[in-house]
Amino acid sequence: MSLPAHLPSLDIPSMEALFDALTDVAFFVKDREGRYLGINDTMVRRCGRRSKHELLGKNALDLFPRPLAQAYMAQDRQVIDTGIPLQRHLELHMYPGRSRGWCLTSKTPLRDAHGAIIGLVGTSQDLGAPDEIHPEYRQIADIATHIRERYHEDISLQGLADAAGLSISRMERVFRRVFHHSPRQMLVQARLNAAIERLGARPTDSIAAIAYECGYTDHSAFSRQFKAQTGMSPAQYRATLTA
């Protein structure tokens, strides 16, 4: 795909080549209309396609289920319209074959020589296993275990930090170095993973009951957070399991 006339100096092929070497990071460049101008090989695999040519020039609606595509496009629109980058946003991605995985997504406006926003560039990094050989891992291992096993309780992050003899800021920094995301994001991930499992395994249970079991005291708050992280409401997600 050839570049639009207003992007003559953007060396997308070189950017793609740089990110092609990163198998756990999806990279993309989009124009103002959300069309893909550049992607790396990981992005191709995430979309279940064989080559970059199958994605270039298309938008999210061409590649993802409609609820997800609409959420991605709304996110893009906010970045482009406000000029405010999206930084390390925790998201649940749905991959071909209905598998899923957690990612940290970042998007930043792409500007021309005059400062006008002409699109965006972004990355989405897979959240893999923690770095257990990191010298600081033992400082927060018990905190992580507590969050993962007792997500359904009213967890105080301040209390966990105090018990470990750490300040909140210190705990946050170590979590990001070892787990690549914050303790609050880990709690969200644990609760939503549990909710997702229940939505699939117990199709007749009410969404409110599932939310309560997973640590939410407010059904509407659960629904808002579920959609913010997955791009779909709990009901929409449950519907995809029987589609």
Image (cartoon, helix red, strand yellow):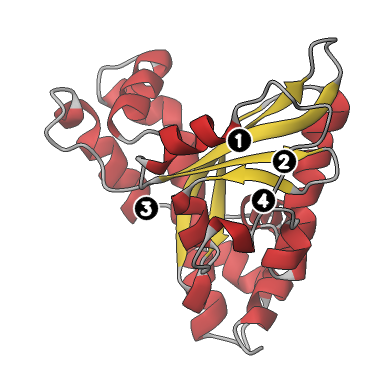
- Look at discs 2 and 3 and give the one toward the viewer: 2
| Circle 2: element type | strand
Which is more N-terminal, label 4 or label 3? Answer: 3
Question: Which amino acid does the dot numbered 3 rest on?
Answer: Arg
**Mark 1–mark 4 distance (CA, rounded to whole Å):** 22 Å
Residue picked out by circle 1:
122
Q: How many residues crowd around disc 2 within 10 Å: few (fewer than 14), some, or many (20 or more)?
A: many
Whole-percent x and y of residue 216?
Answer: 60, 55
- Look at discs 2 and 1 and give the one toward the viewer: 2
**Mark 2–mark 3 distance (CA, rounded to whole Å):** 40 Å
Residue 102 visible to an observer of this rendering: yes
Q: Are marks 2 and 1 in contact (CB under 8 Å)?
A: yes
Question: Which amino acid does the dot numbered 2 rest on?
Answer: Lys
Looking at the image, which residue is at 77% across and 68% down? 66
Q: Nearer the viewer, residue 182 or 66?
A: 66
Looking at the image, which residue is at 72% across and 41% down? 30
| Circle 1: element type | strand
Whole-percent x and y of residue 35?
Answer: 76, 49
Whole-percent x and y of residue 56?
Answer: 67, 53
Say above or below: 60 vs 15: below
**Mark 3–mark 1 distance (CA, rounded to whole Å):** 34 Å
Residue picked out by circle 3:
150
**Mark 3–mark 4 distance (CA, rounded to whole Å):** 19 Å
Question: Which amino acid does the dot numbered 4 rest on?
Answer: Gln
- Look at discs 3 and 1 and give the one toward the viewer: 1
Which is more N-terminal, label 1 or label 2? Answer: 2
Say above or below: 206 vs 54: below
Whole-percent x and y of residue 165?
Answer: 25, 17
- Look at discs 3 and 4 and give the one toward the viewer: 4
